[in-house]
Amino acid sequence: MDFFQTLQTLLLASTPHEKIKGFNAFYTYYCNSNETVRHSHKQPIRFTAPSYASYCHMVPPQQVPRRKNLQSTEGQIALVHAVAHIEYSAIDLALDAAYRFQNLPQRFYDDWLEVADEEIRHFQMLETILHDLGSYYGDLSVHNALFEAQERTAHSLLHRMAVVPRYLEANGLDATPQIIEKLQRLPRHDRLTQIIEALRVIVDEEIDHVRKGDYWFGYACTLEEVSKACYFDIVKLYYPNTFQKPRHINVNGRKASGFTCNELKQLTQRHICD
Ligand SMILES: [Fe+2]
Ligand SMILES: [Fe+2]
């Protein structure tokens, strides 16, 4: 099996069905064979559009449908669709890490394929809820912010690990519990319970994705002979004003995924742990 060529095909697959079916066959083979990744001399290609470009209607982030009333079916569809889109984009982000950054230890490829497998499960959980709500993935407009982060960091393992798992996915660790709390304040309803359960599974499992990102960010720092303190400078290159706003963070989730108290202090401008 040509590992990198297969990943390229999976990254280009333009529908969820094609991507997930292809990944499942590939991942079963990968887990059951004892083959190690054979590195090729072929340069990874750059993607000019996200794989869902022909499947979903793309709009600027401000134009994505809002989830105003979470008690209404419409509001629930907007919420679940938005999270499903993050998970779907995260499948490509994980596959792209394994595809693009070559000549790394086997564990790197094991890690990101495991993440892709979990992102698929997250996506499918939400897709099931969307179907129950009478909707489907691709029903609403989406933005391509995660794809942009993927492409902008395609040149550097250090930047990719800082920006994608350690910044964007870590932000999810902060945001998802807040959404859960908001849903818990609403009158109880089976559908809301189903959404809350799915979000709980996601936030729990995302801790491990950020932890893997933390490990490989540290590895990239060693390769490039820089200190992990460069994290803030790298993130600011891509999101210049992001650390200026006050933020509510998930201290336990962030600590479990490798952030130090010193970093959390820098993030929040407050002393929140020792
Ligand atoms: Fe996920
Ligand atoms: Fe993730």
Image (cartoon, rainbow, N blue to C red):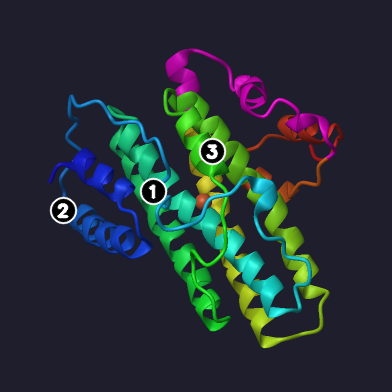
Could you say whether the residue bearing mark 2 is in a helix, strand or loop?
Answer: loop
Q: Is residue 94 magenta?
A: no
What span is colored magenta in the figure? 218-246
The majority secondary structure of the magenta stretch comes to helix
The location of residue 164, given as percent across then percent down, is 54, 38
Whether residue 76 sits left or right of residue 136 in the image: it is right
What label sits on residue 51 in the rendered view? 1
Number of callouts: 3
- Outermost residue, left direction? 1
Residue 228 image-quadrant placement: top right
Q: Is residue 233 magenta?
A: yes
Q: Amino acid at mark 3?
A: Val
Q: Identify residue for label 2.
A: 33
Q: Is mark 1 within 8 Å of ligand 1?
A: no
Could you say whether the residue bearing mark 3 is in a helix, strand or loop?
Answer: helix
Q: Amino acid at mark 1?
A: Ser
Q: Earlier in the sequence, mark 2 or mark 1?
A: 2
What label sits on residue 164 in the rendered view? 3
